[in-house]
Image (spheres, rainbow, N blue to C red):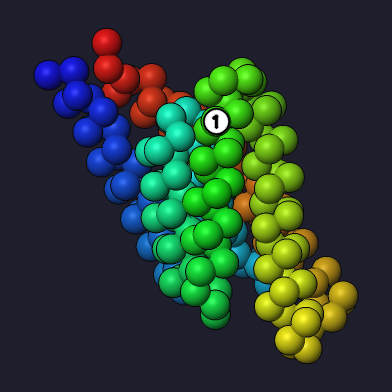
Amino acid sequence: MERRFTVFRFIAYSLELLLLFVLQTTPSLLPEIYGGKPLLMIPAVMTIAFMEEQIPAMFFGLAGGALLDFGYSDTLGYYTIMLTIICFVISFIFRDYMVVSFLNAMGFTALITAALVSLYFIFFIALAGKGGLMYYVSHYISRIVYTIVCTVPLYFINKFLFRNLMDF
């Protein structure tokens, strides 16, 4: 009976990821700010990793990364691998060494979002000769900021789900 709440919580997280994938990939649903739409999977799986243990966090990172690769990037595997590793490490750090708070979540999510998107640009856009520094400034900075802003509601949604569907 106690495992029932864990299953409901994981189903709620999965539905959240699917809903965010639909929101992210539907044209003209979310407004573009300076040519960039938010990458909603990054803050979603990160906020799940803050709350959950390592193995479930890793699998949600895997699922969110795969959805992000399918819906956003031209290369399959970058976000899948990176978010799987990052979610495992984040969950390990916050389960054993740090306190989950809003400021910690915003700081870690901002840092990791900026690093992930910037590395994606360097490896798959700049080195391929598809864009330079001005392309990064005009398209990727707004995408990073927009994604970080979307962390705020996702943090509180996942915190609500974790606390209200926790096993007793």
Image height check: is 92 above or below 73? above
Q: Amino acid at mark 1?
A: Phe
Image height check: is 54 above or below 35? above
Residue furthest to the bottom in view is 129
In the displayed structure image, the side of residue 128 where residue 14 appears, left or right: left
Q: What residue did someone put label 1 on? A: 92
Image height check: is 63 above or below 129? above
| Residue 85 x, y percent position in the rendering | 55, 49
Image height check: is 71 above or below 161? below
In the displayed structure image, the side of residue 162 where residue 98 appears, left or right: right
Q: Looking at the figure, which quarter contains the N terminus?
A: top left
Q: Looking at the figure, which quarter contains the C terminus?
A: top left
In the displayed structure image, the side of residue 149 where residue 19 appears, left or right: left
In the displayed structure image, the side of residue 52 where residue 90 appears, left or right: right
Residue closest to the eye, 106 or 7: 7
Query: How crowded is the residue under tag 1: few (<14 C-alpha within 10 Å), some, or many (20+)?
Result: some
